[in-house]
Image (spheres, rainbow, N blue to C red):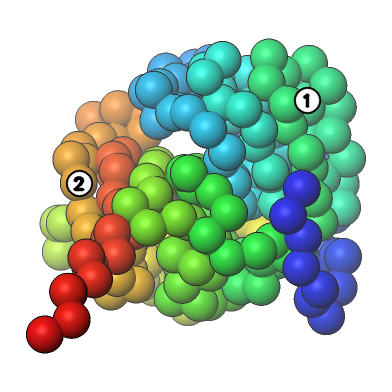
Amino acid sequence: MPLRRTRTPHDAVHHPVFARLYARWSPVVDERAGVRAHRQELLAGLSGRVIEIGAGNGLNFAHYPGTVSEVVAIEPERTLRRLAVDAAVRAGVPVDVVPGAAEALPVKSEAFDAAVVSLVLCSVRDVGRALAELRRVLRPGGELRFFEHGLARGRALATVQRSLDRTVWPVVFGGCHTARDPLRAITAAGFELGPYRRLRVPDTAVPSPASPCVLGTARRPAEPEARPPT
């Protein structure tokens, strides 16, 4: 695995209570809210070497296609990382679970063909820095796959989201924020946005603050061709 030296502590994130609760209810949400199908769509067609940040308890691992040669899964939270190691053993592709923070990835530049973010940009400390790191470690032309919840397009729900983000939501849900705008952050980080679609998870008549989601692709721009000397 292409590692680089970093001063980031192994437990850059520590939410033990939330991690235990998440480990219990996330498989239920995957099944009942249709998240499993979205994970499959997110990862379909990937190939080569892939980096996934915020791998959690490894629910994505079972859905990586056999065309993937290796997954390097970054997870900063100790409890979730231990569960991810167990999930990696059962995965159909090689998965290496590594401690680290999204804002300082312990891997070399331009080492991966694709990157995956799945319900994680809501909780990283610095979204712009995390995406800049992903752009760094992707090869030119490499693909970013994203499945994220974020800012609602309706004014009423967006107002509720911003209020919750300033008060109880991050405290209760392990640093999660509901009003971040993943599409804007991805383009601001220099990625070229590809096809994406908006969806609601779960798809109920009354949305929760975390229901508005986007699922799609982006790319690190290919390096410009060198001009011949004049």
Q: Disc 1 marks which residue? A: 87
Identified at 29% across, 65% down, the residue is 223
Label 2: state its secondary structure: strand
Identified at 22% across, 58% down, the residue is 192
The Cα atoms of the two marked residues, 1 and 2, are separated by 30 Å
At which x and y percent is residue 141?
Answer: 33, 52
| Mark 1 touches mark 2? (CB < 8 Å) | no
Above or below, 183 against 146 in this view is below
Label 1: state its secondary structure: helix
Above or below, 192 against 50 in this view is below
Judge the density around disc 1: few (<14), some (14-19), many (≥20) Cα neighbours within 10 Å: some
Above or below, 143 against 192 in this view is above
Q: Amino acid at mark 1?
A: Ala
Q: Does any portion of residue 69 appear in the rendered image? A: yes
Q: Nearer the viewer, residue 65 or 81?
A: 65
Identified at 57% across, 38% down, the residue is 49
Task: State the mark number for residue 194.
Answer: 2
Q: Residue furthest bottom?
A: 230
